[in-house]
Amino acid sequence: MSCAFLGGEIINPSNNYVVISKENNVLDTINLDQNNRFLYKINPIDPGLYTFSHGGEIQMVFLEQSDSIVLRLNNLDFDESLVFTGHGAKENNYLINMFLQNEVVNNKILRMSQASPEKFENDLDSIKAIFQKNFDEFKTKYKTSDLFNEIAQANIDYNFYAQKELYPFTCYGNTERKNLDELPDGFYDYRSNIDYNNEKLKNYFPYYNFLKYHFNNIALQSHFKHSKDSIFNNKSLDYNLDKIKFIDSLVSNDSIKNSLLKFAAYRYVNSSNQIDDYTPYLNSFLEKSTSKKNNEQITSLIESLINLKPGNTLPNTLVSNNAGEELHLTDFIKGPTAIYFWSYNMKNHFIESHKKIQELRKKYPEIDFVAINIDNNEDSWVTYLKQHQYPLKNEYHFMHPEISKQILALNTINRVMLIKKDRTIVNGNTNMFSKHFEVELLGLINQ
């Protein structure tokens, strides 16, 4: 049988469907039945990693020929409650357990990273040896396939490689330059074994996350060689140009390269307010990226951000209030205003941002804090606010979300816009969770 089945039950679903994908391509959207269950046949099966998503949460499942896997999870505790049964379940339960163990171990490793590089490396090797021993016993006992073994081994290797790439950034006692200078010989010997073009792993979290950390690190090492900087500055144009240069030179797989370039561009543009640096960065990006879609997205984003530079007038777009009345975005700006955004697909951000704003309203009554929901469903947002017992005052919804998000360059939910009474922009790209945010609010009041 050259097919496979994936089904399951979702307790406390946030909507009535799940999405099955492979390599970022959506295979199908499957509706849940009256019992919150689903069943999907993949025919023909392309063995490897698939993703299933529900309500903004995402997880991976490993499928091979003739597998028939049933998953069960509680949407309120998505990853921790996920279990698999059926043919092929043992491999998937192993992978989800590794995922959860990695989360715990990575927090422990973060504390370990305050030690000297020699001690850190020894302790890290000891933990990795435990993971390796458990995996060796598992694959021997269950006679797992070569493909599964490759993926599970990559999980171990790249997760621990990532911790070594992160070490210079997470050892807080010294500058990043000093941390790098004091690394012992051989600390990064594993780099000679890196496969930058692994088609099977390109969407696998441990592999992809490692590549991101790796390019951050080698770009910083290069940057320090031709810079007097000693501290990591992720807003530096030169550093970010170095990063995409290395991605371009070391990665030949177009899919992996374009994905890493896009991620790097979003990270840079979202962290930097140096608008004059955007054009040289964009030119370098376009020389390297071969994805027409990505090129259009990054170009559009940068053009929109340039329009949002301080001193410009806030672009207008249509919103609705909780009564369904249509308004222009600028209609409710009567004084110093902070505009933030939320989505019910990002529950944690929704709760944390509203909690934060409740505190800030008490501290800065001179400022109007305005929330805008960015989701496509124009009815659910009010219900969602009521369910969480948040007041509806100063809550709005984009009438045309996709158009508005493009106009306001909303590629990240964390963006906050600070606007003067006369509707000119003070900062079109800040973050309420930044340690400098309250200083910016005081600056807005004093404009």
Image (cartoon, rainbow, N blue to C red):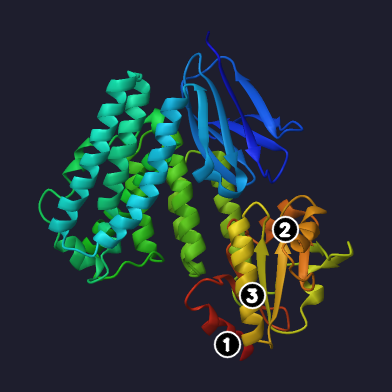
* Mark 3, residue position: 357
Query: Residue 141, located in which quarter of the rendered image?
Result: top left
Query: Do labels 3 and 2 touch, CB within 8 Å?
Result: no
Which kind of residue does numbered mark 2 sit on? Ser
The dot on residue 404 is 2
Asked whether residue 306 appears in the rendered view, the answer is no
Question: Which element carries disc 2, helix, strand or loop?
Answer: helix
**Circle 1 residue:** 442
- Asked whether the residues under the numbered discs 1 and 3 touch, taking CB atoms below 8 Å apart as contact, a structural biologist would say no
* Relative vertical location of residue 368 with respect to residue 189 in this rendering, above or below: below
Local SS, label 1: helix
Q: Nearer the viewer, mark 3 or mark 2?
A: 3
Say which amino acid is labelled 1: Leu
> Which residue is nearer to you in this view: 143 or 54?
143
Query: Residue 77 or 150: which is nearer the viewer?
Result: 77
Mark 1 / mark 2, whichever is N-terminal: 2
Which label's residue is closer to the chain start, 1 or 3? Answer: 3
Q: Residue drawn at (60%, 31%), measured in percent from left and top?
A: 20
Of the residues shown, which amino acid type is indicated by label 3?
A: Ile
Residue displayed at 66% across by 82% down: 361
| Residue drawn at the location 67% of the way across and 45% of the way down | 12
